[in-house]
């Protein structure tokens, strides 16, 4: 399998380290049911057959984290972007509505 690194071009997957699913988002600790949401976030992962987004680290190359779109049935990669270019999810608003400055 070859992964298209935005900096290095198409490289063998052996140059990368796999982290896993790129879709889980850290739950709001102040939300009702936060304990169950954190259990799901930390321990439970899906194992889909088909399109999947996952984190890969180019350890033997540019040392950048990538978000790779891959089909888990065929290993066909449809895209890879730098993790730093992926929009971060909005941080939960602290209880009381105050925002950090
Ligand atoms: Zn690279």
Image (cartoon, rainbow, N blue to C red):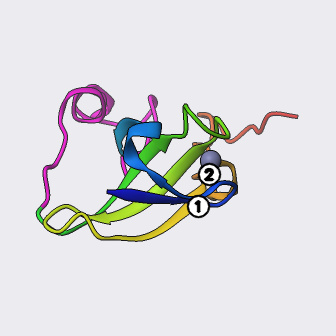
Residue 69 lies in what quarter of the image? bottom left
Q: Is residue 33 left or right of residue 73?
A: right
**Pick the front one: 97 or 38:** 38
Residue sitting at x 77%, y 39%: 99
Q: Is residue 25 magenta?
A: yes
**Image quadrant where one finds the C terminus:** top right
Camera-side residue of 96 and 1: 1
Query: To which residue does mark 1 refer?
Result: 81
14 relative position to 48: left or right: right
- Residue plotted at (61% across, 44% down): 91
| Figure quadrant of the N terminus | bottom left
Q: Please give the range of residues in magenta.
A: 22-48
| Residue corresponding to mark 2 | 88
Q: What secondary structure is marked by label 1?
A: strand
Residue at 45% x, 43% y: name it: 56
| Residue 70 within the magenta-colored segment of the rendering | no
Q: Please tell me whether residue 6 is drawn above or below residue 51 in the rendered image.
A: above
Inter-mark Cα distance, 2 to 1: 13 Å
* Dot 2 or dot 1, earlier in sequence: 1
């Amino acid at each position: 399998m070859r992964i298209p690194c935005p900096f290095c071009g198409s490289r063998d997957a052996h140059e990368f380290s796999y982290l896993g699913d790129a879709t889980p988002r850290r739950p709001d600790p102040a939300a009702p049911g936060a304990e169950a949401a954190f259990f799901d976030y930390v321990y439970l992962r899906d194992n889909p057959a088909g399109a999947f987004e996952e984190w890969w680290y180019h350890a033997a190359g540019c040392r950048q984290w990538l978000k790779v779109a891959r089909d888990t049935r065929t290993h066909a990669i449809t895209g890879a972007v730098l993790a730093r270019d992926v929009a971060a999810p909005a941080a939960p608003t602290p209880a009381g509505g105050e925002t950090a400055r």
